[in-house]
Amino acid sequence: MKIIEENMTASDIDLLQLLLPEYYGPDQVSLRLKELDWDEEFEKDMLTGKGFIAFEKPFDRDKNKNLYGIHSPKFGTSFEDENGFAERYRCKCGKMIGKIYEGETCHDCGTKVQFVDTDLKIFAWYHIENPEFKIIQPSMYKKLEAFIGKNYLPDMIEFKYEMDLNGYYQLPDKTVLTKNPYYGIGMLEFRKKLPEILEWSLKKKKNKQALYDNIIENYDKIFASNIPIYSSVLRQVFLTDEDYSYTKIDKKYNSLMANITMLNKQKEITVGTTKTINLSLYKAQRKINMIYSFIFKIINQKEGHIRENILGGRINFSARNVIIPDTTLRANEVRLPYLTFLELYKPEIINMLMRMEGIGLTGAVNKWSQAQMEFSPGVYEVMHYILKHTKYGCQCIINRNPEVTGYIAAMLYRIFLNCWKLSQRQSAAKPSI
Ligand SMILES: [Zn+2]
């Protein structure tokens, strides 16, 4: 159902679709998260030149970056490099590099040297050569874990069979099979038997039909032969004279590489190699899961990059205060501290100072800054003047995070300025700039 009136502008329609998607076409506005197919992404990256296979150690003996390591120069240069960041100014073919050539035309490709930002879409990939050996894509692993069971799944993928004297693989303790018939089968068997395991699990957990359907829908994305490694620009390594200092994630990537190299040495599955292959796959899987949770931790929750560093910054003309009750105020009134008012009305105050005292912008800004460091009776007077002479009174939006009640407490409040004494105490404290 769509209710779009003829005289609506494009932005009206956009806004309505945003606010009332169910009435204005949910298919056009809804955001959908999709499971990634790692093998498909790998192929895409290799075709477009955005990806490369990593098979070398990150650094050689002289601490130079290896071209096919996870700190490859293909990601771009960093602080440690000679001419670090020089490649950010380059021509198309890359022959002319550096800011000193900015604007000059390259003789080879005929393009001008200009600023090119670091490409974060470049990925290194660990590639498992044998198509029989596959790891589980970690977000699908989470789903399998939720469906099969947190205790069951790790027991299944860890190979626990031992070879007996006749050369047959046997389980040391067969009693575990009554509870978990797929106990200790290892990664290789797990992949073959997964449809059967899912059916077995579904019989026990009828309430998980929706999750089951989701897993089946994404079945071809569960197993992968390629593992992506994001740009080294985002995981800096620090070199000292004696040592490298890797990030947590890098340490895992490095030890994961040992497992991948091990797997790529195994040409086929025989009785002799079954155990080695299974264990290498299992160890690789555990590391991939850990890397996945590290990455999640970096961006997730209140301490994550997104909320703490990207959204957590202060916006101009805004301030943060502790809300305390005041019985002398009406429901739509608020008393603001001196410092908060100073910030919220920064342009107005500076404008007033310029007009009242006949000074220039720089002088007024300096006065304003000084009033932030030390209480200024003059500026306080200006504030009162603004409060008194603004048509309909001064108003501000206050917002309390909705963690207590769930409704957004953003309302317009009429401002009263806090009393003299409190403001003096306030300004004695260090202002947060
Ligand atoms: Zn060129």
Image: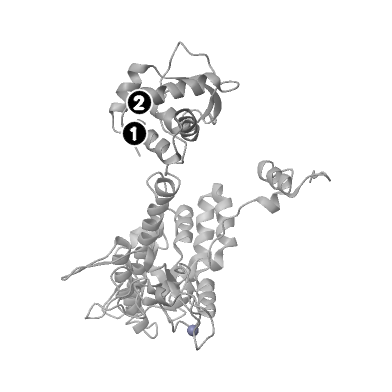
The quadrant in which residue 227 appears is: bottom left
Which one is in front, 253 or 378? 378
Work out which residue is located at the far left of the displayed protein and give it.
Answer: 242
**Label 2, on which residue?**
376
Q: What secondary structure is found at the residue carrying circle 2?
A: loop
Examine the rendered structure and indicate whether residue 294 appears above or below residue 114.
Answer: above
Q: Answer yes or no: do the residues labelled 1 and 2 have beta carbons within 8 Å?
A: yes
Please name the amino acid that badge 1 sits on. Gln
- Compare marks 1 and 2 and give the one earlier in the sequence: 1
The quadrant in which residue 291 appears is: bottom left
Which one is in front, 113 or 80? 113
Q: What secondary structure is found at the residue carrying circle 1?
A: helix
Q: Where is residue 248? Give x, y as percent.
A: 29, 61
Q: Where is residue 45? Give x, y as percent.
A: 51, 75
Which one is in front, 135 or 328? 328
The quadrant in which residue 16 appears is: top right
Ligand 1 within 8 Å of the CB at mark 2: no
Q: CA distance from mark 1 to mark 2?
A: 8 Å
Q: Is residue 389 visible?
A: yes
Q: Where is residue 187? Give x, y as percent.
A: 40, 69
Residue drawn 35% across and 39% down?
A: 433
Work out which residue is located at the far right of the displayed protein and give it.
Answer: 6
Examine the rendered structure and indicate whether residue 411 appears above or below residue 304.
Answer: above
Relative placement, left or right, of 243 versus 156 is left
The label number, if any, that marks residue 370 in the structure image = 1
Residue drawn 78% across and 44% down?
A: 8
Examine the rendered structure and indicate whether residue 416 appears above or below residue 321.
Answer: above
Please name the amino acid that badge 2 sits on. Ser
Examine the rendered structure and indicate whether residue 433 appears above or below residue 371.
Answer: below
